[in-house]
Amino acid sequence: MALTREQMAQRVARELKDGYYVNLGIGIPTLVANYVPAGIDVMLQSENGLLGMGAFPTEAELDADMINAGKQTVTALPGAAIFNSAESFAMIRGGHVDLTVLGAFEVDVEGNIASWMIPGKLVKGMGGAMDLVAGAENIIVTMTHASKDGESKLLGRCSLPLTGAGCIRKVLTDLAYLEIEDGAFILRERAPGVSVEEIKAKTAGRLIVPEQVPEMTFD
Amino acid sequence: MAGLDKRVSTYAEALEGLEDGMTVLAGGFGLCGIPENLIAEIRRRGVKDLTVVSNNCGVDGFGLGVLLEDRQIRKMVASYVGENALFEKQLLNGELEVELTPQGTLAEKMRAGGAGIPAFYTATGYGTPVAEGKEVREIDGRHYILEHAIRGDFAIVKGWKADHFGNVMYRHTAQNFNPLAATAGKITVVEVEEIVEPGELEPSQIHTPGIYVDRIIQGSFEKRIEKRTLRD
């Protein structure tokens, strides 16, 4: 069975380490915050200038001056820091964020990512995504493996305008966890009950399948 | 306004000298920390053919979005413009030009503009449409593109408190692009919730030193929330 959004977030959360500073993109990545493993502390960086983003506010805590990168109202944890946008992107571009999680439309075997524009259909802008992929060492892309029509999104070459070139090494889809190395996707884990055959069929780019591809487990 | 005292008493005074064809830098992220009354004053003045530089363009009917209604914006430089139907319509009609700029690059362009740095190299956008037509340099084995600084004829900024000298403090995430825009306007106008006496703001807590600020005005603010999100 393909992973649910929550399971994808749970799997990504396993990559968190104690003391990590983390930037979570909008969509599935934000859910990662709900699954921080017990016993470790991480700090969420929000590109609009907040380090130490907390949960959504209660009615009483609601404040128009406290929002996240997705423009939702949020709270700040004790020990949070707020700074201006140049400072925020200095942190991001300067490689100080330990883990960046974001979504994509397409990823290819060269580690290119397309996530911001569909010519003729969606031209709203890239926001902070290009800075995030250019500045980060440790990036996990979360995405569906194929479109609703079964078209692969893991390609030999991205067809859409790129967000970044050669910057992606780790991809978590609803079917699998893969790494990108030397011009190929390497299948590391599969979703529970999902066959290697299904994953092969839905991966258009070159795919290397090791002898053993463990199933992910969830409580 | 006299010497170091930046206070003006009307919004008309605040934007005196704003003319057709000018470039205006505006602080704000979404609707957070937007100079809503200065924007409304631009609307009232009817100046047109503006190039507006801001992370976003408000929403339909609020924030910078209102400047689209009378077609006052000719060109928008922004990182994300998805929130207004009118924007999309004018863009598709060719009535509005957009230069989509990565958010970090936009922030750095404003910072550089205020700081006397004419251009800088960044890896952001290399290999993407953003790099088209731009100089590329390889530094220590990595490719970077050359981006130029941005300066405006006017910078409109929303602050929290200012003193008479134009020293400004911002509140929470309403800070965002405001301090950067403040440095890069030929004429920088800051609207704030409260104006205090010099000496009331702790010097080491000031976000924007008054040297950058030309005019300050006290206003009241709707502070509309774009996505009211509560925890259940």
Image (spheres, helix red, strand yellow):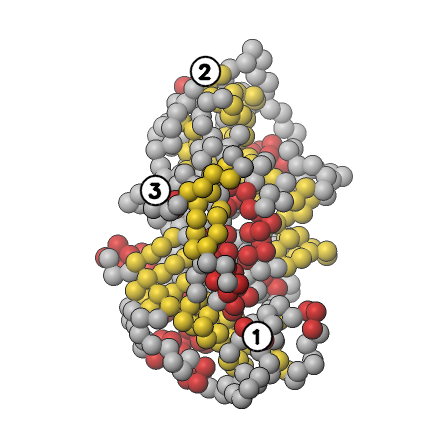
Name the N-terminal-most of marks 3 and 2: 3
Q: Is residue A107 above or below residue B181?
A: above
Q: Chain of mark 3?
A: A
Between A142 and B96, the one nearer to me in the picture: B96
Residue B11: image x %, image y %? 45, 83
Residue that numbered label 1 is attached to:
B211
Q: Are marks 3 and 2 in contact (CB under 8 Å)?
A: no
- Residue positioned 34% across, 33% down in the render: A159
Q: Which residue is mark 3?
A: A118
SS at badge 1: helix
Mark 1 — on which chain does it sit?
A: B
Cα distance in 3D space between marks 3 and 2 = 30 Å
Q: Residue furthest top?
A: A211
B207 and B118: which is toward the camera: B118
3 and 1 marks on the same chain: no
Q: Is residue B40 above or below residue A170?
A: below
Q: Amino acid at mark 3?
A: Ile
Which dot marks residue A197?
Answer: 2
Residue A60, percent from left and from top: 64, 65
What type is the residue that disc 1 sits on?
Ile
How far apart, in angstroms, are the residues tagged by discs 3 and 1? Answer: 44 Å
Q: How busy is the neighbourhood of tag 2: few (under 14 within 10 Å), some, or many (20 plus)?
A: few
Do we see residue B175 in this rendering?
A: yes
User: Nearer the observer, disc 3 or disc 1?
Assistant: 1
Question: Is the residue A133 above or below the residue B66 in the image?
Answer: above
Query: Could you tell me which residue is drawn at 68 percent across and 41 percent down?
Result: A20
Q: Amino acid at mark 2?
A: Glu
Task: Determine if marks 3 and 2 fall on one subunit.
Answer: yes
Output the chain of dot 2.
A
Q: Please state the horizontal and vertical placement of residue A125, each as a whole percent of the image.
A: 40, 50
